[in-house]
Image (cartoon, grey):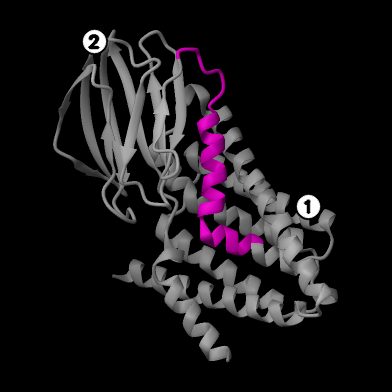
């Protein structure tokens, strides 16, 4: 039975569960009134078809040949529009369920707008009013946490590891705080870790978490400290991608703040759902059996991710 569980875990991990945090990014700068220069960045490891943009019909469009830029395939687009893009819609088609598209628009008068497009919401309407806060990064944080399966797996393991809502909340918050520190350090250029090596180390944290799940609750000491230490690595894990898509320097603090608040909200969305499952399992006396299943699942995914990520480094 255990071998069957591990086999299924490895099969499912090979595709869906091994993606990195690489959102697409559409950056539009209004260089003159009604003239725009856009940079469309899509992840090379995009799951699914290559996404395509649709601009308002009031614009004449010229495109340059795409070029590689780190983990992204970038394309320069020039727009000459009969009217302002304010109040107009931009659409994207071909996004996968695991990739969002951050939209940043810098107007000629200095106003900025940021929003998010995804598979469920493939259209964004540029507001006529000035946007004060970079709320697009908040939604990107929520989407990243819920769509980043390695992070979800880690939070899931923490929920099964700890009893009580308050201790769990403290532990998950410690994970987010550490996440925030290394994200800021990396984006600011103070210190960075190689992306591939970091991803492999993140897989090791998941394997260690599975090992902790084999212990009894009385044997587990200071889980918040473990979560904080591992959160430092997880923060480096997606800081590289966030740096590549770009954050505006004049809104750097707010963008990072909103992004991390989004991550925390995403985590807090998971806790009640899994908590309800644990309550039901306790009620029917199946928690220990299900905990074993979760332990094998987390350990199997961690091992698979570690092996494949090390393999990508040496090849």
Looking at the rendered structure, the number of numbered marks drawn on it comes to 2
Q: Is residue 121 above or below residue 225?
A: above
Q: Is residue 297 above or below residue 135?
A: below
Tell whether 209 sits left or right of 93. Answer: right
Q: Which residue is rendered at x = 23% and y = 21% of the image?
A: 57
Q: Earlier in the sequence, mark 1 or mark 2?
A: 2
Q: Which residue is mark 2?
A: 82
Give the camera-side residue of 6 and 252.
6
CA distance for labels 1 and 2: 53 Å
Q: Which residue is mark 1?
A: 170
Residue 202 position, x and y percent, is 53, 63
Residue 191 position, x and y percent, is 50, 45
Q: Residues within 10 Å of mark 1 (few under 14, many from 20)?
A: some
Mark 2 falls on what kind of element? loop
Tell whether 299 sits left or right of 270. Answer: left
Q: Is residue 238 above or below residue 86?
A: below
């Amino acid at each position: 039975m255990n071998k069957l569980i591990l086999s299924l875990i490895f099969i499912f991990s090979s595709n869906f569960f091994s993606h990195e945090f690489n959102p697409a990014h559409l950056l539009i700068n209004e260089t003159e009134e009604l003239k725009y220069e856009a940079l469309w960045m899509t992840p090379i490891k995009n799951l699914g078809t290559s996404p395509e943009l649709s601009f308002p019909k009031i614009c004449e469009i010229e495109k340059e040949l795409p070029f590689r830029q780190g983990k992204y395939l970038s394309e320069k687009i020039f727009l000459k529009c009969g009217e302002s893009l304010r109040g107009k819609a931009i659409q994207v088609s071909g996004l996968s369920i695991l990739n969002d598209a951050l939209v940043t628009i810098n107007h000629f008068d200095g106003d900025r707008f940021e929003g998010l497009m995804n598979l469920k919401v493939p259209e964004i309407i540029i507001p006529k009013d000035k946007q004060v806060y970079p709320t697009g990064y908040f939604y990107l944080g929520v989407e990243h946490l819920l769509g980043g399966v390695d992070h979800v797996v880690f939070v899931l393991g923490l929920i099964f590891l700890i009893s009580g809502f308050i201790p769990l909340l403290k532990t998950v918050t410690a994970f987010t705080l550490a996440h925030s520190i290394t994200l800021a350090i990396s984006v600011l250029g103070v210190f960075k870790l190689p992306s591939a090596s970091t991803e492999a180390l993140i897989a090791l944290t998941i394997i260690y978490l599975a090992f902790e799940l084999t212990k009894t609750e009385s044997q587990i000491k200071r889980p918040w400290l473990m979560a904080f230490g591992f959160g430092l690595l997880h923060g480096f894990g997606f800081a590289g991608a966030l740096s590549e898509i770009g954050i505006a320097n004049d809104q750097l603090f707010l963008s990072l703040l909103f992004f991390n608040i989004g991550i925390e909200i995403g985590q807090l969305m998971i806790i009640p759902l899994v908590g309800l499952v644990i309550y039901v399992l306790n009620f029917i006396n199946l928690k220990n059996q299900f905990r074993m299943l979760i332990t094998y699942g987390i350990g199997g995914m961690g091992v698979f991710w570690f092996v494949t990520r090390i393999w990508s480094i040496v090849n």
